[in-house]
Image: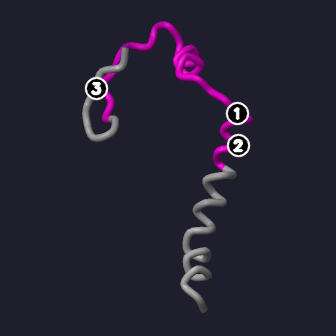
């Protein structure tokens, strides 16, 4: 088996998954404002852990 075939076997599925995920995300676009509006106006701010740090929702 050549090196290029081995590379294609290892990296190919990740490339395909990335392309499929991108296509699905384009079909179903959700913005942050849509998600916040579903939570309702009376929801209190809370502390959340995001990307290695704590922050307060606004």
* CA distance for labels 1 and 2: 6 Å
> Quick check: marks 1 and 2 in contact, CB under 8 Å?
yes
Residue in the image at 33% along x and 21% along y: 46
- Give the number of callouts: 3
- According to the picture, the residue beneath numbered tag 1 turns out to be 28
Magenta highlight range: 21-49
- The one nearer the camera, 5 or 34, is 5
Q: Quadrant of residue 53?
A: top left
- According to the picture, the residue beneath numbered tag 2 turns out to be 24
Measured from the top left, where is residue 32 in percent x and y?
A: 53, 22
- Mark 3 vs mark 1, foreground winner is 1
Instruction: State the quadrant of the N terminus.
Output: bottom right
Is residue 26 covered in magenta? Answer: yes
Considering only vertical position in the picture, is 12 above or below 4? above
Considering only vertical position in the picture, is 23 above or below 8? above
Is residue 39 covered in magenta? Answer: yes
Q: Quadrant of residue 2?
A: bottom right
Q: Earlier in the sequence, mark 3 or mark 1?
A: 1
- The one nearer the camera, 36 or 44, is 36
Extreme residue in the bottom direction: 1
- According to the picture, the residue beneath numbered tag 3 turns out to be 55
How crowded is the residue under tag 2: few (<14 C-alpha within 10 Å), some, or many (20+)?
A: few
Task: Kindly state the secondary structure of the residue where label 1 is placed.
Answer: loop
Task: Kindly state the secondary structure of the residue where label 2 is placed.
Answer: helix
Task: Kindly state the secondary structure of the residue where label 3 is placed.
Answer: strand
Measured from the top left, where is residue 14 in percent x and y?
A: 58, 62
Q: Earlier in the sequence, mark 2 or mark 3?
A: 2
- Mark 2 vs mark 3, foreground winner is 2
Considering only vertical position in the picture, is 52 above or below 20? above
Residue in the image at 61% along x and 53% along y: 18
Instruction: State the quadrant of the C terminus.
Output: top left
């Amino acid at each position: 088996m050549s090196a290029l075939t081995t590379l294609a076997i290892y990296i190919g599925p990740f490339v395909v998954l990335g392309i499929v995920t991108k296509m699905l995300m384009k079909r179903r676009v959700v913005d942050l404002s849509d998600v916040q509006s579903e939570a309702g106006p009376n929801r209190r701010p809370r502390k959340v852990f995001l990307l290695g740090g704590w922050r307060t929702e606004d």
